[in-house]
Amino acid sequence: VLGIGGVVSIVIAVFAGLFLAKRALIPIQLSWEKQQRFIADASHELRTPLSVILVHLERLFRNPDHTIEQESENIWVSIQETKRLNKLVSDLLTLARSDSNELQIMKQHVRMDELAWKAVQSFQQLAELKEIDVQANIEQPLDMCGDGERLYQLLVILLDNALKYTKEKGTIKVTCRRDNHWVTMVVADTGIGIAKEDLPFIFDRFYRGDKMRSRKMEGTGLGLSIAKWIVDAHGGRIRVESEEGAGSSFTVMLPSRVKDAG
Ligand code: ADP
């Protein structure tokens, strides 16, 4: 169906992913136990999409006469799982690079209000599909010193979660303001909320609320650990307030001047 070329490309892509993952699995500054845990967790998470891709590619091979339409389900699943693998590997690389201090934040002038608008706008369409109302209250101008790319990534992680964990017709509120020498950003949703027993662990690598696993929601359990790294690297703080069934609110406080950033 895909032809030998297609299958070979997928296999090459998977191996390239594994090569990058191998690099990602060598965090230098973690303690030995943490390193072992990181490797075990990462391997486990990588294995799941790989097994699924393998099963679907084998099915394709078994039916060489089938048309693309007949095999569209197999192809679709393989593409989705390859995307998942891609995201997982890039998240792992970010964390591994941050562990080895390879990844440092760039100190530069940033218009946080513009970044926040850009992030909110990029989610607008997805939110409309779920009939979720996105409200933004962003003070202008919000000048600060930091790494624009990373700060944008931080907002995307929080907005992505808010959207993912909020049911249809819910509301997401984004607030950005200056409080003296701090820029405060709040992403609040009316979503499913976080169980009390999960709250202490949600910033840990690979931690996913139990409900998320059982509901088979997409995710890697790495988003919030990357968000925390970005906030820490800027000398800021992140905290969460949440009530099951009522919603969650993530508050990020960043110093407007980052002093000892790389
Ligand atoms: P992922 O979303 O990929 O599972 P994250 O690290 O981004 O991983 O989040 C960790 C866990 O925190 C999620 O599995 C979920 O249980 C919980 N969580 C994060 N954001 C929200 C939110 N806005 N509403 C409800 N639960 C959330």
Image: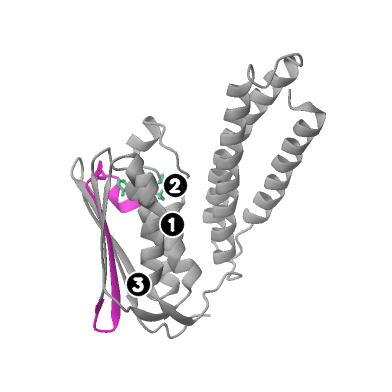
| 100 or 235, nearer to the observer | 235
Residue, x 61% and y 35% (percent of image)?
79
Pointer 1 residue Cβ closer than 8 Å to ligand 1: yes
| Residue 76 position within the rendered picture, expressed as x and y whole percent measured from the top left | 58, 29
Residue, x 42% and y 57% (percent of image)?
156
| 194 or 82, nearer to the observer | 82
Residue 13 in magenta stretch: no
Amino acid tagged 1: Ser
- The circle drawn on residue 225 is 1
Relative height, residue 3 to residue 210 (above, below): above
* Horizontal side, residue 76 vs residue 4: left or right: left
Image quadrant holding the N terminus, namely top right
Q: Is disc 2 in contact with disc 1, using a CB cutoff of under 8 Å?
A: yes
The secondary structure type at the circle numbered 1 is helix
Residue under circle 2?
221
Amino acid tagged 3: Asp
Q: Which residues are magenta?
A: 178-202
Relative height, residue 206 to residue 101 (above, below): above
Q: Is disc 2 in contact with disc 3, using a CB cutoff of under 8 Å?
A: no
- The circle drawn on residue 113 is 3
Residue 192 in magenta stretch: yes
Whether residue 79 appears in this view of the structure is: yes
